[in-house]
Image: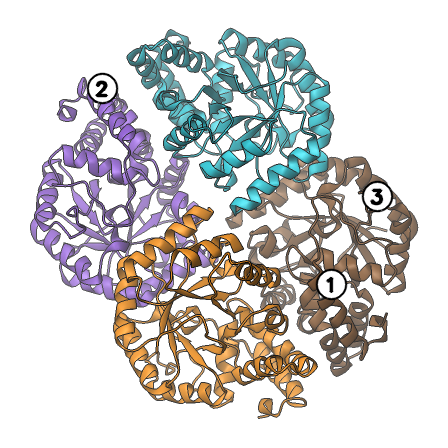
Chain colours: A purple, B cyan, C brown, D orange
C-alpha cells in the first residue's frame, strides 16, 4: 500500500499522546488511531511537527509507526525531516520496512535560492532511495523556505517518487491554481495536493483543485465532511459547515499555542486520555481554555459533535 | 488634539486611493475619509504599509496628511517608519505641524536582541523629539522583529511620549493579558492597545483588555459594532456579528493579496472610485474576485451592509 | 560621462564627513574627494550604506552629489536603494540631472525566490527609467538576499541599463568565475564586476576575472596598486602588498564597527577633519583604537603610507 | 576528566575522515587524532558542524567518540545540538558514558528574544541533566541567533554546568571585553572563552581576555603557538606568526567551501588519507585548489610547516 498521486480526502496529522509524566501513552495511540478512522480519514500522517516528533527517541518513533501501521488499515505517511541525510535515510528505510506508505520531507530553514531547494530534494532522494514515495512539505510560515510553483514543478518532474504536495503556503490559493494549470498544460506530472495550515482556507482550496486536507484540526470529521460535500457539488453546505467551525479553526491555528488547544479538544472528545505534551511544552492558560470552551459551546449550536 | 493613552474604539488603517493611471485620487481621499467617519471610527491611521506609503513621494505624503486632517475631525496617526532617522524626523515634524495627533513607528527587520529594539526606540524618540506621541507597531509576521512584553514595558517606561501599542503579534492573546497585568502590578504606565492583524482575533482581544482595533478591514463599521457590543457586555451578539464576518476577515488578511481584496470591497461599497494600486501592485485574479463576491453574498444574509 | 560595462579600477565607497555636532562637513567633502583622487581611484560611489545615506535629509543627499560631481572629474555612482520606488525614482532622476554617472540598487531584505529578485529589478528599472545605468548590489551578508549566477544573468539580459555588479557575496570567488564563463559562452552580456566586502578577497577576485574593487577600505591607494600590479601580471608583488594590509583590511571589515575604524583611519590620514558619525553612531572603544594603531604601526614597516 | 572553566589553549574542531566512497575512515581517525596532539592541542571538539555530524548515523557518532576518547588522552567535547531534546539527551548521556569531558550546544535558528534563548538552555540542561558540563556555541553568522553579553551572563549564572563559551560572534572583540568585565564586577561566574570563526581574530581575542581557540584551521600548531606566545607576552612574535597565516586563515574561513579547503590541507599535511566529504559535499574547484597551493607556497617562506 504505497502512496501515489491519486491520494485524496483527509490525512490527519496525528497528535502523539503522552502521559502527564511524559511517557508515551500507547493505549491512547490506539484510541486516537480509532478516533481518526471513525472521523472518516483516508490516511494518517505521523511524526510531523505537530506530532512532537523531535521530542521522541529514535526507538519511540519506530514503535509508534509500528503500532499505528498495524492498527490503522489506511496509508500512513511518516515525517522524516532531519538535519542530516543519514538520520533521514535511517528513519525512512525503517518506517517503510514497517509498512508506511510514504514519507514527508520539509526543507531546512537555511535554503534560499531556487537551486538550493531543488538540490536539497535531489540529495534527499539520493539518500532515501528513489523507491520511497515522498511528500514535499511547503510551509514557509514556519520553515521560512519559499517555493515558487516553478520550483515545485521541477522537483516533481525530477523525481518520480514525488507523489504529493503538502500545501501550506500562505497565501496559497493562486499557487494551487498555477500548479493545476501546469499539469493541464503538460508541464508537470500529476500529483496529489493536500492542504495544511490548520484548514484555514480549505473551503476554497478544494475549489481551486486541491484533493483534500492534511492537517491536525481536532475535528477531522468536519474536514472529511467538507471534502465530501465539495466533491458532490454541494458547495453552500460545505461552506456552511466550514464557516461554523472557522472561529475554532482559526483559534487552533495559532503558532506555538495551537497544539495545546488541539490536544485539549482531542481530550474533551475522548480521543486521548491526557492533553499533556512532552517537555518543552506550550501551555494553555485558564483564559485560553475558557475561550476554547466558549467557542465549542457556540459551535455546538450548529454541529452536535462539539457538544460536551 | 494629541494622541494619548486613553484612545479607544476603531482607528481605521486608511487605504490610499489612486486613479487607474497611478495618480493620487484626491476626490476619493475625501470620500474615503467620510466613509470611515460614517462607519463610526474614532480615528484614522494613514501612510501605513497598507496605505502604500513607500510608493508615495514625500510631497504626496504631506498632501494626503493635510487633506485627511483637514476633513476628518478625528485624531490622525501617521506612519513615519523609515530606513533612517533623518527621513523619520522630517516626516514626523512635518505631519505634526499639519495637525496629526501622533505617529506610528515600526522597528526595522534587522533588529534581533531586546537591547537592540529598546535602543532603536530611544534613537527614534531622540530623532523626532519627545513631544510627539508615538505608537509602537508590533508586527512580527511582516517585520520579523519579536518584542516580548518585557521589551514593550521598557519602551513604555523609558518614553512618556509612547502612548499606544499597535498589537499585531500572532499569536497575541496572552501578550495582551500580560501587558495589562504589568500595568495593574504598577510595573508599566497605562497605554492604549489597539489590535491589527486584519481583526482576525478582535473578538477575544477585546476580552483580554484591548481598547479596540487598528486595522484596515473593509467593514470598519463591523469592527466598531463589535467594540461597542463588547463594551456594553453583549458578548454573544459581538461574537455573532464577528463570526459572520470571519470568513471574509480571514480572506482579506492574506499577506500580499490582502490589499487588493480590501480595495476591491471598498470600491464595491462606494468608498473609493477605483481599486487601483500604484505600481508595483498585487493583483486580484478573476477567481479571487469571484470568491470574494461569494463571501459577500453569504455575509449579506446576516449583515445587510454586505449586499450589493 | 555615463557608466558602462567597461568600468574598471577602484571605485571608492565614499564616507560622508560630519562635524562632531552632526552637521555635514562640506569642507571635508572636498578634502576627501581630493584624497580619493590622489589615491588613484577611477570613480566614486556615494550615498551607500557606509556613507550613512539613511541619516541624510533628501536635500543633503542632493547637495553632496552636486558637490562631489562638481569636484571629482571621475564617474560618480549614487546609491538610490529605498523602501519604495517613488523615493528611488526621485533620487535617481535627481542625481542624474546633477551629473551622476549611474546609480546602485540593493534588493530589499524581504526578497527570497529567484522570481522575486528578478521582478524587483524589473520594477526598479520601470520606476527610474531604462536610460539610467545601474549597478546590482549583491550583498547577502547584510541584505540577506541570495542571488545565484543565473539570477544575475537574467537581470543583466533583461535590462541593457544594467552595466555593473557590485560583487560582495561571500564566499564569492566561484561566482565570478561562473559569471565570466556565462559571458564567454554567449549567455550573458558583458558587465563590469567590482568587488566589495572591504576588499577581503580582492587578491584572488582579480585573478578570477573581476575588473577591480568598489569598497571603502581606508587605503584606496593600496587597492589601486593591487589592481595595477595584477593588470601588469606582477602577481607576487600584488599579493605581497595585499597581505601586508590584510590584518587591517580584516579588522576594518567588521560589521557594525567597521565604519568607525574606517573614519578613524581616514582622519589620521588627513582626509577628513573628524571621524564623527551622525547619530545613531557606532563607537570605537579605546581598546579598538589602540588595536588599530598597533596594526597601522605594523603595516608601516612595509607601507610608508601607514606611518603617522 | 570533566571539562571546567579553567580550560585553555587550543581545542581543535576535528574533521571527520571518510573514504572516497563515503565510509568512515577509522584508520585516519587515529592518524588525525595523533596529528592534533602533535600540534599541541589541549583538547578536541568532535561532531561539530565542521565534523559533518549531521551526516553520521547515531551509531557512527558513538563509535567515533569511543575511538577518539580512547586514543587522545586530552578532554573531548562533543557537539550534541539536535532539533529535539530527546536526541540531545541520548547523545549527551551516551558520549559522557564513553568518557567525553563535556558537550557543546548550539541554539536552534528559530530563537529570537532574550527570553527564548535563556529558556532554551534551561530546557536543554533539564534534558541532559545538570551534571554534564556544557559549552554555549555563540555563532550568529551561521545560526542567526544573536546573544547579548547579558544573555550569556544569565545562562552562565543559571547553570553551574555551563563552563565555557565557544565565542564566534562577529564582530566579537568588545563582547569578550564585556564578559570579562562582568566577571570582574562580580556579576558572572568565571567561564572559559575559546574562540572560533576559523581563528580570524585570534590575535586580538587573546589580548581581550580569551583563553584560547576552538576552531578547525588546518594548522592547529600555529594556533597553539600564538596562544603560547601571547601567554608569554611575546606580542609581536605572536602577531608576526598569525599574520603570516592570515591569508590562508581567511581563505579557509569561507562559509560553505571552507571545509573542502581544510580537508585538502589536512590531507597534504598527511593527517588524513583522503579529503573526501560524505555527501552532500561541498567541492573544491581546480582554481580554488591552485589558489590554496599558492597560499601555502607563500606561507612556506615564513613557516616551514607549510612546505610540501
Q: Secondary structure at mark 1?
A: helix
Label 3, on which residue?
A: C24
What residue is at 54 percent from the left and 82 percent from the top?
D224
Instruction: Mark 3 and mark 1 in contact? Answer it, CB < 8 Å.
Output: no
Q: What's the distance in space between the residues labelled 3 and 1, CA to CA? A: 24 Å
Q: Position of residue B170 (x, y in %)?
A: 41, 34
Q: Is residue B266 above or below residue C99?
A: above
What residue is at 15 percent from the left and 41 percent from the top?
A274
What residue is at 15 percent from the left and 47 percent from the top?
A19
Q: Nearer the viewer, mark 3 or mark 1?
A: 1
Q: Is residue C297 above or below residue B242?
A: below
Label 2, on which residue?
A: A298
Q: Quadrant of the C terminus of chain D?
A: bottom right
Q: Is residue A86 left or right of residue C130?
A: left
Q: What's the distance in space between the residues labelled 2 and 3, CA to CA? A: 64 Å
Label 1, on which residue?
A: C289
Q: Is residue A203 left or right of residue C220?
A: left
Amino acid at each position: 500500500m504505497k502512496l501515489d498521486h491519486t491520494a485524496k480526502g483527509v490525512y490527519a496529522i496525528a497528535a502523539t499522546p503522552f502521559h502527564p509524566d511524559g511517557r508515551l501513552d500507547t493505549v491512547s495511540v490506539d484510541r486516537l488511531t480509532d478516533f481518526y478512522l471513525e472521523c472518516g480519514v483516508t490516511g494518517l500522517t505521523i511524526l510531523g511537527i505537530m506530532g512532537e516528533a523531535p521530542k521522541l527517541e529514535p526507538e519511540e518513533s519506530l514503535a509508534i509507526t509500528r503500532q499505528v501501521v498495524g492498527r490503522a488499515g489506511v496509508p500512513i505517511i511518516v515525517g522524516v525531516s532531519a538535519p542530516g541525510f543519514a538520520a533521514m535515510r535511517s528513519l525512512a528505510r525503517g518506517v517503510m520496512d514497517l509498512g508506511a506508505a510514504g514519507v514527508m520531507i520539509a526543507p531546512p530553514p537555511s535554503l534560499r535560492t531556487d537551486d538550493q531547494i531543488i538540490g536539497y530534494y535531489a540529495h534527499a532522494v539520493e539518500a532515501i532511495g528513489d523507491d520511497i514515495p515522498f511528500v514535499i512539505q511547503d510551509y514557509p510560515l514556519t520553515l521560512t523556505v519559499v517555493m515558487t510553483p516553478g520550483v515545485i514543478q521541477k522537483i516533481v518532474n525530477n523525481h518520480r517518487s514525488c507523489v504529493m504536495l503538502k500545501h501550506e503556503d500562505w497565501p496559497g490559493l493562486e499557487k494551487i491554481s498555477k500548479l493545476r494549470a501546469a499539469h493541464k498544460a503538460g508541464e508537470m506530472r500529476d500529483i496529489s495536493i493536500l492542504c495544511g495550515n490548520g484548514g484555514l482556507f480549505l473551503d476554497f482550496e478544494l475549489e481551486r483543485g486541491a484533493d483534500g486536507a492534511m492537517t491536525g484540526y481536532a475535528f477531522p470529521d468536519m474536514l472529511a465532511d467538507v471534502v465530501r460535500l465539495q466533491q458532490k457539488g454541494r458547495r453552500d453546505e460545505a461552506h456552511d459547515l466550514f464557516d461554523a467551525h472557522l472561529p475554532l479553526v482559526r483559534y487552533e491555528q495559532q503558532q506555538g499555542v495551537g497544539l495545546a488547544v488541539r490536544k485539549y479538544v482531542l481530550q474533551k472528545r475522548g480521543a486521548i486520555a491526557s492533553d499533556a505534551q512532552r517537555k518543552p511544552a506550550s501551555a494553555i492558560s485558564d483564559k485560553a481554555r475558557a475561550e476554547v470552551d466558549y467557542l465549542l459551546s457556540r459551535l455546538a449550536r450548529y454541529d452536535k459533535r462539539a457538544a460536551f
